Image: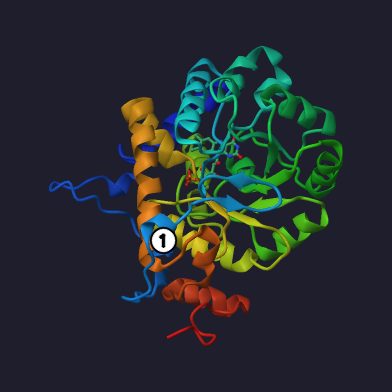
Amino acid sequence: MTGSRKDDHVRLAVAQHGADGTPAHGTPSDDDHPTYPPSQFDEVHLTHHALAGTDRERVSLRTRCDVFDWRAPLYINAMTGGSTMTGDINRDLGIVARETGLPIATGSMSPYLKDPSTAGTFRGVREHNRDGFVMANVNAHATAEQARRAVGLLEADALQIHLNAVQETVMPEGDRSFGSWPAGIGRIVAGVDVPVIVKEVGFGLSGRTVSTLAGLGVRVADVAGRGGTDFARIENGRRPHADFAYLDGWGLSTPAALLDARGRGLPLLASGGVRHPLDVIRALALGAHAVGVSGGFLATLLHGGVDALVRQITRWLDHLTGLMTLLGATRPGELSECDVLVTGSLREFCTARGIDIPGTQGASR
Ligand code: FNR
C-alpha cells in the first residue's frame, strides 16, 4: 500500500513538471525558448545597477551556518523511498549528489520504520554518495528511537522532520491528529545527536511557526512554500470525487514564507516552486541560506536520466555564479544586501502582515 502510494506520488508530481524540470505549463515553446508559469517569485525584483558587478573569480557559492558548510546554496530536497521504483530513484539521486556535490535528503522514512526490508530503497542515497551531506526524513509522529534509526540507516548529517497537515487532511487514508506535533518535535530534537531541520512540504512555514520551532530546539527551518509541487492537488486527485479542489492556492508561497519567517531566530532554507537560477538568487536575497528543489529535479531525472540532471545542476551552479557576479555578491550571504523591490500581491501580503517591505527602508539608490 505504502509502496504504491510512493509510486503514485512520483508519477503525479512529475506530471506537474515539464521534461526540463520546469513546472508543467512552463515547457519549452516552439522556438525552444522556455517560458515559466507565473509565480510570486516574479514579484521579487533585484534592481539593476549597471556598475554593481564584481569579478567572477571573486565569487564563491559556499554557504555556511552553524549547522552546515555547503559548497553551493542548492540542495536536492526530500522526495522518496519505500518501493522498488523509488529505490532506483534514490540511488540515482545519490549519484547526482555525489557528482555535483549537492546536499540531499531522502523522502519520508516511515516505510523503513514500518518495514525494515525497505532499507535498501533509502540507503542508495548514502551508498553512492559516501562523503556527501545527507539528510534523513521523518514525520512529527516519529519517536526519538525511530528518528535515531532513520539517521543511523543513512549515517545522516542532519534530520528533516516534515510538517504536512494539509496533505494528510486531503489524503484519503491520511492522518487526522496534529496536536501532538510540537511536543513530538521537542522529543526528537532531544533524542537525536544530529541537527534537526523542520520543513513543510509545499504550503510554507509562517513566522509564527518558525518562532515555535526555534523554541523547541530546532536548528534550521525550510519554509518549503507553495508554487511548485502541490500535494493538495496530488492527494485530491487520489480521492474519488476530487472534492477538495477548493484548497487550490492554500498556504504561503515560498517568497511570502521567507518574508514572514525571517528574523524569527532560525537560519532559513527555501524550497517550493523554484523554477530557475534567478528564483534561487531571489530566495537568497530574501534571506535564505540555501535553496532546495524536488519535483523539478525529479522530472529531469525521470525524463533524461542521471546525466541530464547532472547537466542541469551544473548549468544552474554556473548561472548562479554569473548572476552573483552581475549583482556584485561575492558570496550568497551578500545577496541579502541587494537592492530588492517587492511588488504586487507579495507587497500586499507584507502590508497586511505588518512586515517591513524590502526596498522601502532607505534602499541604496
Ligand atoms: C515530496 N516532498 C516530500 N517532503 C518530505 O519532507 N517528505 C517526503 O516524503 C516528501 N515526498 C515527496 C515526494 C515527491 C514525489 C515530491 C516531488 C516531493 C516535498 C518536497 O520535499 C518539497 O517540499 C515540495 O515538493 C516542494 O518543492 P518543489 O517540488 O516545488 O521543488
Residue 147 image point, x, y percent = 77, 32
Colouring convention used in this rendered image of the protein: rainbow
Ligand 1 falls in quadrant: top right
Q: Quadrant of residue 99?
A: top left
Q: Is the residue 292 above or below the residue 211 in the image?
A: above
Direction from residue 18 to residue 254 in the image, left or right: right
Residue 86 image point, x, y percent = 51, 22
Q: Is the residue 173 above or below the residue 210 in the image?
A: above
- Identity of the amino acid at label 1? Met
Residue 145 image point, x, y percent = 83, 28
Q: Label 1: which residue?
A: 324
Q: Is the residue 4 above or below the residue 251 in the image?
A: above
- The residue lying furthest to the top in this view is 117
Q: Quadrant of the N terminus?
A: top right
Residue 146 makes an appearance in the image? yes
Direction from residue 113 to residue 321 in the image, left or right: left
Q: Residue at x 26, y 45 (%)?
A: 27
Direction from residue 70 to residue 100 in the image, left or right: left
